[in-house]
């Protein structure tokens, strides 16, 4: 199917770039150039390989909230701390409320950019974002609302959930992103980085690898059949099949598996013999059906983009890509039936993507509306705990003096806090407090994070409650060096100096 | 018989395509008009024997179809056909209906377009014309899953109620190993085309001679007029013509039959037609009417054989309404017997599909009932502490 892609934030921009690279490599022209990237900081824009520069839209660079938000950090209470100078001041500092505000204010700019994309030429749109980032979550929310109000086509969301190694603040942002995206979007495809990362390697060194794996899976579903194979298969997958599968909404997950096919001369001779009626049905054909079924099974049991109980799925789509002459139809049917048995749903659509010259057969399984997703529950628990701690801090601060930086945001965010009866601006403080802990991360990924984070916290909040806080924060931030790629809001210590300037005057940086 | 044929959806169109292929190869002239209707542009490009201007894409402007099919959703298939009924009517404008005896609508019942759009098309045709409208439906196999079974069970009701007769074809009965995705259902479609064309082309004055016992179109229509579901049996044997006797001996397993007497051969052929794979397996005795057509060189069709075959079928079907006739094909190198069992009421596969459909419908309803709730519960925390951004 044809898809327009909208990357948001650093993580989203990078993943879109990866998807475009995969598009070029596989010859599946599924975007036809209908791509855009939105960011509040130029960081990821400098690194793209396939995403054209004119499709990269920087927003909020002149936004007063962004500037005001950055400024106090320089003469705020933590000026002296080493972390302050190394703070990632680019973009919206991980604050989804600010991200949303910026996007709201810049809607005219966003709409102008959207004109570059022809929604009548595509079957669906996809917003690609890091769920834990201020831009990824905040700007995407507004963009999603906008797309849903102007487009007739389905709008999907694809993006990474923050790893357990990342900060609590990002967990909170991501949990809220899920809460926001799912009702708005036609389907949401979260990617669980924890599943995909090897625990021994720093996360930020793995993002490219992970993004590649994700891009492969996303293309296998959404770009199926876009490579113009020159052959027509009877059971070819249609865009309507993908859309109907995702039509039920909720979260979706992708499984993927591949096997080599024997394209040797021997196979050819055997087929020729068969064609001439000189050979009986060869045992090859029988193993072939079993092979296809095995392949489907291994896709079903493969590492999913987000782990879930597949029995909780609502609808399923199976796509077999490969040389149609090598795929047993019986195997195809039994593979499909296997999915019905394993998932317990009868809504199993299946089709193939004919690739006559491929040397392998790929089975891709899309599980739509999976409702038993442990990672989401974990994320919510962590988010709620963190939020409660932050609320407690806020209360403490409320009774003393408010942090100056926070006040700038009151009007933007207070309404969203309707749940918290007596707290008017708890969220700004999450942002604030969290941003401080992120300071710690950014500066001290490899060094003494613990002390800094502790200092950080104790400076920003009431010392009493900060004592309790420090442990958790520090523990989280220890390993929290991954934000470079996944996030919209932080950078490594090296870039910090530049980034800070860039945020203040992004144009000059270009 | 002269037919206007309409294929709806991918499978239905393929069958029409194969029918035209078969009649051209055998010098028959059955399909006076061909038309294919589909919701997917890619599928519409597949037929090789249907002219470009006889292919109608529907649902191009439908929000969910957009020329890409209906994703197996029969409701959308029906909706699209209903919306564009004027376009469908219009394409019949150049069909000279007085030139045809009947209309045949072919569709796969498991998919969304065939099962949903075909009954709409049939309903419209019944309104427009007095000629009988027959249905040719492909029943999905068990392994095609619950959704196709549900589509088929529901569509079957509409089909049987709206058409003058419904010829069923069971994919499962014809499923075999060794077929690849590329071949798809080609073998099955050819088998079906052979049967339906051999049956319905009987009594047609094309290059055939009029024989004394020639089957007439009106006989076939009379057999079909009881309605319900029908099944077709078929068997053929090579006839010894000097030219290709050697070749046919190699390719045809029925060599031994040639040595038997003509009468016994004819009867054996009909037995085989009924006992071999019917288009849909059924209890032969549950048929209301039956008809046998012998297609082949007149010299091969022994009168005695025809009589004894007819008597045998009368016993098998437990009905006296059995017609038998010839379709003389002097130049044919095969002798074929095709048996039509009209209004068979005992068809185990249809029962199975209905059972599978009921289970599927229950599952779907259960899913629908909890869908919103489950999504809501997934995205919110226990105490609903987390609020959305916008």
Image (cartoon, coloured by chain):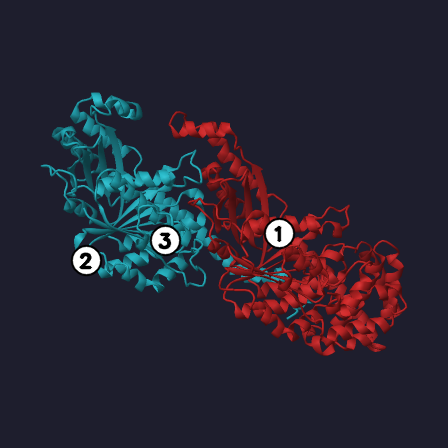
Chain colours: A red, B cyan
- Point out residue A180 in the picture as x, y percentages from the top left corner: 63, 66
Answer few, some or many: residues within 10 Å of disc 3's Cα (few below 14, many 20 plus, some between 14 and 19). many
Element assignment for label 2? loop
Q: Which of A509 and B134 lies nearest the eye of the viewer?
A: A509
> What is the quadrant of residue A450 in the picture?
bottom right
- Point out residue B59 in the picture as x, y percentages from the top left corner: 39, 60
Q: Which chain carries label 1?
A: A
- The mark found on residue A21 in the picture is 1
Residue depth check, mark 1 versus mark 2: number of the one nearer the observer: 1
Between the C-alphas of marks 1 and 3, the distance is 40 Å
Residue B286 in sight in this render: no
Residues marked 1 and 3, same chain: no
Element assignment for label 1? helix
- Point out residue B50 in the picture as x, y percentages from the top left corner: 31, 49
Which residue bears the numbered disc 2?
A: B130
Q: How many marks?
A: 3
Residues marked 2 and 3, same chain: yes
Compared across the picture, whether B168 is left or right of A25 comes to left
């Amino acid at each position: 199917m044809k898809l327009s892609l909208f990357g948001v934030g650093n993580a989203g921009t990078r993943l879109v770039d990866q998807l475009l690279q995969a598009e070029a490599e596989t010859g599946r022209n599924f975007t036809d150039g209908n791509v855009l990237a939105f960011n509040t900081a130029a960081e990821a824009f400098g690194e793209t390989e396939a995403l054209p520069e004119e499709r990269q839209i920087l927003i909020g660079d002149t936004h007063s909230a962004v500037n005001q938000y950055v400024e106090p950090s320089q003469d705020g209470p933590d000026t002296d701390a080493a972390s302050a100078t190394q703070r990632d001041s680019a973009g919206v500092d991980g604050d989804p409320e600010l991200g949303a505000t910026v996007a709201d204010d810049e809607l005219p700019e966003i709409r102008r950019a959207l004109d570059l994309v022809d929604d009548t030429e595509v079957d669906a749109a996809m917003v690609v974002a890091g769920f834990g980032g201020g831009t990824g979550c905040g700007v995407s929310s507004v963009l999603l609302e906008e797309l849903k109000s102007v487009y007739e086509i389905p709008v999907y969301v694809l993006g990474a959930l923050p790893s357990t190694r990342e900060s609590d603040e990002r967990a909170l942002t991501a949990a809220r992103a899920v809460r926001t995206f799912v009702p708005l979007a036609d389907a949401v495809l979260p990617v669980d980085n924890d599943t995909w990362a090897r625990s021994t390697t720093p996360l930020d060194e793995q993002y490219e690898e992970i993004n590649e794996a994700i891009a492969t899976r996303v293309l296998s579903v959404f770009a199926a059949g876009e490579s113009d194979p020159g052959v027509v298969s009877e059971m070819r997958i249609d865009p309507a099949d993908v859309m109907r599968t995702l039509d039920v909404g909720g979260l979706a997950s992708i499984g993927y598996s591949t096997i080599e096919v024997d394209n040797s001369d021997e196979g050819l001779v055997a087929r020729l013999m068969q064609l001439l009626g000189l050979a009986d049905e060869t045992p090859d054909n029988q193993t072939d059906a079993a092979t296809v079924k095995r392949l489907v099974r291994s896709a079903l049991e493969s590492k999913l983009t987000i782990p879930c109980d597949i029995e909780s799925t609502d609808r399923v789509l199976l796509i077999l890509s490969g040389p149609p002459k090598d795929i047993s139809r019986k195997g195809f049917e039994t593979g499909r039936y296997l999915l019905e048995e394993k998932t317990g749903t009868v809504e199993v659509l299946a089709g193939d993507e004919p690739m006559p010259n491929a040397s392998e057969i790929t089975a891709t399984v899309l599980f739509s509306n999976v409702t038993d997703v442990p990672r989401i529950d974990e994320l919510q628990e962590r988010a709620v705990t963190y939020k409660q701690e932050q609320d407690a801090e806020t209360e403490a601060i409320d009774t003393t003096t408010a942090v100056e930086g926070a006040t700038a945001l009151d009007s933007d965010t207070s309404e969203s806090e309707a749940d918290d009866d007596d707290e008017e601006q708890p969220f700004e403080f999450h942002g604030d407090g969290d941003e401080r802990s992120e300071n710690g991360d950014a500066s001290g990924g490899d060094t003494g994070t613990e002390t800094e984070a502790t200092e950080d916290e104790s400076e920003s909040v009431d010392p009493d409650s900060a004592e309790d806080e420090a442990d958790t924060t520090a523990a989280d931030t220890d390993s929290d060096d991954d934000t470079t790629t996944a996030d919209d809001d932080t950078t490594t210590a090296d870039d910090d100096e530049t980034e800070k300037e860039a945020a203040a005057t992004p144009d000059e940086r270009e | 018989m002269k037919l206007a044929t309409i294929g709806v959806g991918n499978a239905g169109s393929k069958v029409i395509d194969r029918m035209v292929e078969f009649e051209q190869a055998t010098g028959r002239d059955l399909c006076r008009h061909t038309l294919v209707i589909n919701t997917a542009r890619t599928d519409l490009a597949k037929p090789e024997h249907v002219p470009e201007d006889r292919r109608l894409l529907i649902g191009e402007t439908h929000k969910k179809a957009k020329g890409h099919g209906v994703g197996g959703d029969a409701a959308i298939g029906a909706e699209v056909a209903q919306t564009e009924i004027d376009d469908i009517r219009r394409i019949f404008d150049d069909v000279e209906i007085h030139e045809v005896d009947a209309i045949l609508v072919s569709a796969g019942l498991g998919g969304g377009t065939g099962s949903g759009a075909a009954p709409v098309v049939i309903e419209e045709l019944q309104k427009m014309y007095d000629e009988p409208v027959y249905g040719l439906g492909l029943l999905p196999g068990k392994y095609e899953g619950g959704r196709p079974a549900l589509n088929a069970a529901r569509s079957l009701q509409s089909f049987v109620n709206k058409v003058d007769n419904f010829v069923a074809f069971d994919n499962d009965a014809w499923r075999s190993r060794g077929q690849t995705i590329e071949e798809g259902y080609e073998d099955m479609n050819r088998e079906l085309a052979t049967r339906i064309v051999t049956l319905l082309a009987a009594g047609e004055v094309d290059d055939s001679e009029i024989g004394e016992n020639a089957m007439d179109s009106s006989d076939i229509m009379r057999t079909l007029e009881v309605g319900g579901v029908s099944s077709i049996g078929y068997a053929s044997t090579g006839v010894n013509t000097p030219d290709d006797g050697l070749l046919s001996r190699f390719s045809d397993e029925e060599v031994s039959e040639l040595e038997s007497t003509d009468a016994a051969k004819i009867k054996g052929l009909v037995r085989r037609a009924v006992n071999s794979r019917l288009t849909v397996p059924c209890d032969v005795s549950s048929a209301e009417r039956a008809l046998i057509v012998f297609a082949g060189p007149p010299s091969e069709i022994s009168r005695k054989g025809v009589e004894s075959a007819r008597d045998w079928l009368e016993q098998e079907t437990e009905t006296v309404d059995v017609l038998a006739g010839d379709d003389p094909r002097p130049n044919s190198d095969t002798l074929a017997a095709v048996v039509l069992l009209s209004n068979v009421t005992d068809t185990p596969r249809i029962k199975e599909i209905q059972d599978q459909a009921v289970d599927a419908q229950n599952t779907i309803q259960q899913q629908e009932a909890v869908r919103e709730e489950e999504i809501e519960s997934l995205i919110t925390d226990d105490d609903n502490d987390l609020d959305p951004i916008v």
